[in-house]
Amino acid sequence: MRSFIDGTNGVKAMVENADKKKIIDDIRKEIEASKNTHIWSDYVNALKLISQVVFTRGSGFVLELIQNAEDAGLGLEEPGVFEVKLRQDRVKVTHNGLPFRENNVQALCGIRSSKKPERGTLGYLGIGFKSVFKVTDRPEIYSNGFHFKFDRNHKDWNNPSNTPWHVIPIWIDEPSEIINEERTTFIIPLRDENCYSALRKEIEKLTMELYLFLRWLKKIEVHDEITGETWNVENIGESEEGVTTLRHDGQMQRFKFFRRIVEVPEEVKQDRLTQEYRANVTKREIAIAFALDEEGNLAPSQAGAMYGGVYSFLPLGEARSGAKFPIQADFLVQPGRDAINYEAKWNHWLVEEVASLCKEAIDFFKKHENWRYQFLQAFEFSKSKGFESYEKLFGPKLIGPVEDFLIEDDCVPTSDGTWAKPKQVVQLTEDQSAYRNLINMRILDENASASIMGGKPDLRFVHPEATVPDSMGIKKVDRWDILENDSFLENKGQTSDAANWFRSFYLWLQKYPRYDKYFYYKWREKLKTYHEYKFVLTSEGKLAKGGEVFLLDLPSSDSLIKELAKEMQSTKSILHPDILTGSTEEQGKLRGFLTGLTGVQIFNTKTFRMKTLLPKICVTSPKPSEDILLKYTIYCQQILGEEVCHDCELWILTKDGGIRTAKEVLFSTEFKPEQNWETNQQYVSGVSFISPKYLSDVTTEPQLVAWRSFFKLGGVKDAPDNGVEEFAMNYALEKFRAKYKNVIAVDKRNFGYDLKAETLKGEKIHIEVKGLSRDQDVELTENETKAADMHKDSFYLCVVSSIPENPAMHLVQNPAAPGVGKKDKLTVEINTWKTAGFP
């Protein structure tokens, strides 16, 4: 037997085992006396609902028994120990709390609670215990000499489905296994072996956060008797600073607690739900806990609290606050411990008090040496819009008020050691050493730098050690904000020391490059550029994008370059000449930065000709004089060569002294072209030839090749358009008119032949002319083939070959005759037409 203090009246009670068996038997008789009444059937229905519907988690009974143990430890000085032994066929739970009294047994054998909320107890012993029926049909209870069980398969039940066996106690003469009479013990045989693996997984989730708000229980031990594994969770204790240390299998976790005793207001006391479930309760304790890392820094995380982070002494299954810190209060919840009543005034009042406690925590954190820079991230909330937990309770009562407080109060630590509202600060994301150099190089004034980057007056920087959540809406600033502050840069460009300031700024940007990360098979870095920003200082004191500015790098000895460079500066943006001063090393850095990262164009001799001289000899410019055209073209060819723009058609000086577009001009004999059209130019109309004046200094074949390539890129063609056809027609007309009469060109009339003529005897002939620049088979079109078939021996194929330099004419009579041409397509092979002469 064990003595205990009666929590109701403090009277010491000792009950003999015989009397305890009588208590069990009397309870059974009392319940069985209601058989065949509606009370009996109502009990059956209610118990089915409670055990299978109210409690949704198979492992929920473990939490219920932990809470019962916590209540049983109320007032005890001895630390509480809760032990779970698990095997495939049963779970055994023991604790060292106050043993059962008669009223506890009666509560277990009914549908009611024996707890007294006004006296600090937490759970629903009678109701919560019913959660064991999710996994068992025969739970056993041993406490203070009470030995009894509930058994669905007891021999006395004719029909268990219609029997309230869940509440009918059956005395146990001999325990099913050895028990410790000094402890309260629950033996829970599992309904089937599948429960074991599921229970083990759930019990493994009972991590150290389970202990957060328990006061008496200090240790939970779990033994898996199948695998031999043992693990435990232990509350080591709370320090003077309010930091509680928990240990889970050697791993430590610490939490900073904030607690407050709050008095129940009258309007909450008068609410119906309060009177039903919390009558006579005048005070309650609320608490919040903030996780700390190994170094003692705040480390908030939603995953750091079990389930949704809402506790009613133990975690609630489905209640989610959206906070990164667990919240404890005596919430009105469903017996299954899954859901919270989101509309109860009691719960609204408790959450409002939690919001007030958060403000106290914020004031505390602001005074702490380290936590002052870390606490803001702890108050970043998740907002589950559309869910009852957010819309009805935690959104309006916790998240909204705390966020409003953070916005309206001076809660952001600043770099000058003070506090400010979020709207008064910006957060610098530049590397601190880079920023200090920005100040040391006098590029920015430290007192004005936040406002310059933030774009508004009277701004301050967030302290560099502070962690600020994105949800606060504090603008993050860096170098890009300087570059986007057009008015600031323009003002700097108008100062007398503008060149020195911009030179320093360029050197700072060059010294501290920024990179973008991108993924291409693996993560890589890409140097960020500044091409889109107007911050390159020109010789006129204006700002432009780098791609619009030229850096002159020209020899001063060339008179032509000097003359045209002066002309160019009136139409182009030139880099301010004082930017590239200083040491050779510094100039090299500036050149590299400006050309590589801003897009400034180096205007050297080659670029100068490309950008300045070449346009003057392109047909997009007015036709130049002969001297200018020769001078500039020779200049460009010597420097640019094949780098001349492909889309720039040149003006060309011709042999007859004219100036024509390149597409109207062919290579003259002096250029030694592959096809010399000048030799027999009388057979092609409207062509001109390049003047040999371009070749005044040309003495070698490679020079000629270079000139031909240059002119081809500038639009000059090797042959005139349709030149071979025109050459052949004109050549044939000349030859036929010398030997035939009435020679007429009919090539435009689609007869299937090009010429009509008469022999000296008056015989009519029809001639199809084909021109070739190289020897190959000749094909006749379908129309030409029909004409050949029709006119037979009076049809002639005239082939003019070796155009343009060595033309020769070959006349094939009746190419459609057998053995002359192939009729698939009428094709006259080389050997056939080449052996035909011209009479």
Image (cartoon, rainbow, N blue to C red):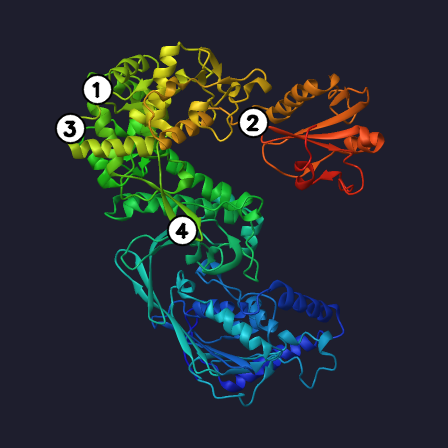
What residue did someone put label 1 on? 556
Q: Give the mark toward the camera: 1 or 3.
A: 1
Instruction: Please give the name of the residue rendered at 69% of the width and 39% of the height, measured from the top-left corner.
Output: 832
Q: Residue at x 37, y 70 (%)?
A: 76
Residue behind mark 2: 804
First along the sequence among labels 3 and 2? 3
Circles 2 and 4: CB atoms closer than 8 Å: no
SS category of the residue bearing label 1 = loop
Tag 1: amino acid: Ser
191 and 531: which one is in front?
531
What crowding class fits label 4: few (fewer than 14 Cα within 10 Å), some (14-19), or many (20 or more)? Answer: few
Q: Are marks 4 and 3 in contact (CB under 8 Å)?
A: no
Q: Outermost residue toward the right? A: 790
What is the spatial separation of the Cα atoms under label 1 and label 3, in whole angstroms?
A: 21 Å
Outermost residue on the left side: it is 583
Q: Are marks 1 and 3 in contact (CB under 8 Å)?
A: no
Q: Earlier in the sequence, mark 4 or mark 3?
A: 4
Q: Is residue 100 above or below residue 752?
A: below
- Residue 582's label in the rendered image is 3
Tell me the mark number nearer the camera, choosing from 2 and 1.
2
Question: How many neighbours does mark 2 have within 10 angstroms: few (below 14), some (14-19), or many (20 or more)?
Answer: many
In this view, the mark in front (3 or 2): 2
> Where residue 95 sits: x, y (%)?
43, 76
The answer to which of 573 and 366 lies nearer the viewer is: 573
Marks 4 and 3, how far apart at CA: 39 Å
* Depicted 19 relative to depicted 531: above or below: below
Can you identify the residue that label 4 sits on?
A: 523
Name the amino acid type tagged 4: Trp
Q: Are marks 3 and 2 in contact (CB under 8 Å)?
A: no
Q: Secondary structure at mark 3?
A: loop
Mark 4 and mark 1 in contact? Answer it, CB < 8 Å. no
